[in-house]
Image (cartoon, rainbow, N blue to C red):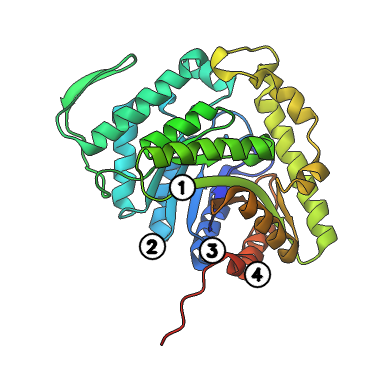
Amino acid sequence: MEFGINFFPTVGPDDKDAADYFEDSLNLVVLAEELGFDHVKTVEHYFFKYGGYSPDPVTFLAAAAARTSRIKLVTGAVIPAFTHPLKLAGKLAMLDNISRGRLQVGFGRAFLPDEFDAFGIDMDESRARFEEGVRACRKLWSEEDVVWDGAFHSFGPVTLLPRPHQRPHPPILVATAKTASSCEQAGRDGHGLMMVPSINKRETVQDMLALYRKAWAEAGHPGQGEVHMSYNCYLSEDAAEARAKGKEYSRRSNEVMRDAVAAWGERRSEVYAGYEKVVENIARADFDRSLADNKVLVGTPEEVTERLRTIREWFGDISVSLQVISGNPSHEESARSMRLFAEQVVPHFRTAPAAAG
């Protein structure tokens, strides 16, 4: 298994100054590399406390690249619907070079109605815009004199500069929430998968993974693909403190998410089947149930180790992204969770090197 840190902000100006947020988060990036984590990741969201301090993952990850030398940098995710593919592909190729090939590009569809409204984009076009954007970026990275005549963009012939550092292009991951067909398509295309298991039943996640891995194998790709899963995380050596603080920060995260998704109370879209229930689902959120179902990684290092062992039995060897800043814990608490996880949890999931002789 691999492990990383997912920087998903849930703050606004009344909680934390933006400059302080970025300074604290970038210091955690440095700590993540020192502690041996495999990746750092951040989101693209706008306007709300739910992710709004991260409107451009590329900018944050470029700053992270300047402070590190080894750790992988993951966009989790960039949104093709909101950016012209010429600009998006160019920015990402630039980051791939700045980091000397440490970039993994996660693409997502977006799902907040207010974001689509602000950009003047029809939500019902989101899937088509996503698919076209991913294909266009991949072509721009891989080929020269590219001519594109799509449903939303036409250009060319153009040759993107700079060329990506990784050839033919950086590894691609696609985000999926509830759509099984997205998992199958990712597997066929040889892309990795990004999931948030807390929003689905365990059996649903297992079915989605089975579809992905089957499509991956049938397409002839080596291995089983790469799967990233994000979990809210809070560790303490005191079990009662971990549970109390983890519950409070989960409550805060749900609160800001509730505000961000409020428009779904009145919005319907055929390409977002079931999303009209998201407001109701957040209102029913039960931390204790989530903890019992291993949907959050909260507890002592020993308790979290056991949770991860169960998760690995369910889902196989995945890449786990820890959300240690969501809910706005103090910088010191986030750093402590990272240290406890790296020092007392990770060693149980690393393969020991073979003995010499």
For disc 2, the marked residue is: 69
Q: Which of the two marks, 4 or 1, is nearer to us in this view?
A: 1
Label 4 to label 2: alpha-carbon separation: 24 Å
**Do callouts 4 and 3 mark residues in contact (Cβ within 8 Å)?**
no
For disc 3, the marked residue is: 31
Name, please, the residue furthest toward the bottom: 357
**Do callouts 4 and 1 mark residues in contact (Cβ within 8 Å)?**
no
Q: Secondary structure at mark 2?
A: loop
Q: Amino acid at mark 2?
A: Ser
Mark 4 vs 2, N-terminal side: 2
**Do callouts 1 and 3 mark residues in contact (Cβ within 8 Å)?**
no
Q: Which of the two marks, 4 or 3, is nearer to us in this view?
A: 4
Q: Secondary structure at mark 3?
A: helix
Q: Position of residue 227 (x, y in %)?
A: 50, 46
Label 4 to label 1: alpha-carbon separation: 25 Å
Label 1 to label 3: alpha-carbon separation: 24 Å
Label 4 to label 3: alpha-carbon separation: 16 Å
Q: Residues within 10 Å of mark 1 (few under 14, many from 20)?
A: some
Q: Residue at x 21, y 35 (%)?
A: 160
Mark 1 vs 2, N-terminal side: 2
